[in-house]
Amino acid sequence: MAHDRLEKAGHKVIHVDQNRFGENVMIYRLMYDDGQDDENITLRVKVISKGGVRVPDSNVHVHVENKHMEIADIKNEGDRVNRGYGSIMMTGLMKLVQEMQIRVITGWISSVDWGHIDRSEHFYRKHGFD
């Protein structure tokens, strides 16, 4: 199973959910064992469907310091938009927030996102951010 292979490689599965298209979406945390795994965090997506296993280029990058998490990037583009991957990634991220007892979450919308600022603002507001 994909789950077992990831964990044998040293990574950690954070969350598994199903989107409205019947795809199982796995969010896993890359672990580098470099002493910074709890500071610089990358979450990735693996999609398991009837067509096989895909690893879309969707990911989350955050930085953590003193119980403060800063969202640097949530990347989900092209044909991956509006498939539920972003919301499932956010659910996985919130599980990590609880696990790490994060007190404050901040971030920004980058200038590279200005072409779809309405969609980005909607996404973050939908998940409880201002």
Image (tube, rainbow, N blue to C red):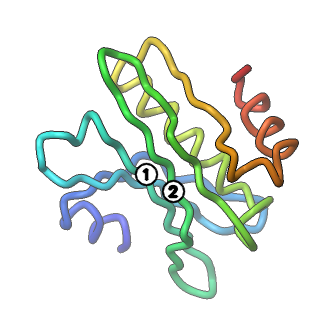
| Residue drawn at 59 percent across, 40 percent down | 90
Which image quadrant: the C terminus? Answer: top right
Residue 97: image location, x then y, percent: 44, 26
Judge whether 90 appears above or below 65 on screen: below
The amino acid pointed to by label 1 is Leu
Judge whether 55 appears above or below 33 on screen: below
- Most distant residue in the top direction: 103
Which residue lies under the disc numbered 2? Answer: 59
| Residue drawn at 54 percent across, 69 percent down | 57
Residue 100: image location, x then y, percent: 33, 24
Are discs 2 and 1 less than 8 Å apart at CB? yes
Judge whether 22 appears above or below 68 on screen: below
Q: Nearer the viewer, residue 128 or 24?
A: 128
Q: Residues within 10 Å of mark 1 (few under 14, many from 20)?
A: many
Residue 10: image location, x then y, percent: 19, 59
Q: Is residue 2 left or right of residue 76?
A: left
- Secondary element type, mark 2: strand
- Most distant residue in the front direction: 111
Which image quadrant: the N terminus? Answer: bottom left
Q: Is residue 89 left or right of residue 126?
A: left
Judge whether 120 appears above or below 44 on screen: above
- Most distant residue in the bottom direction: 51
Which residue lies under the disc numbered 1? Answer: 43
Q: In the rendered structure, which disc, 2 or 1, sits on the residue that comes first in sequence?
A: 1
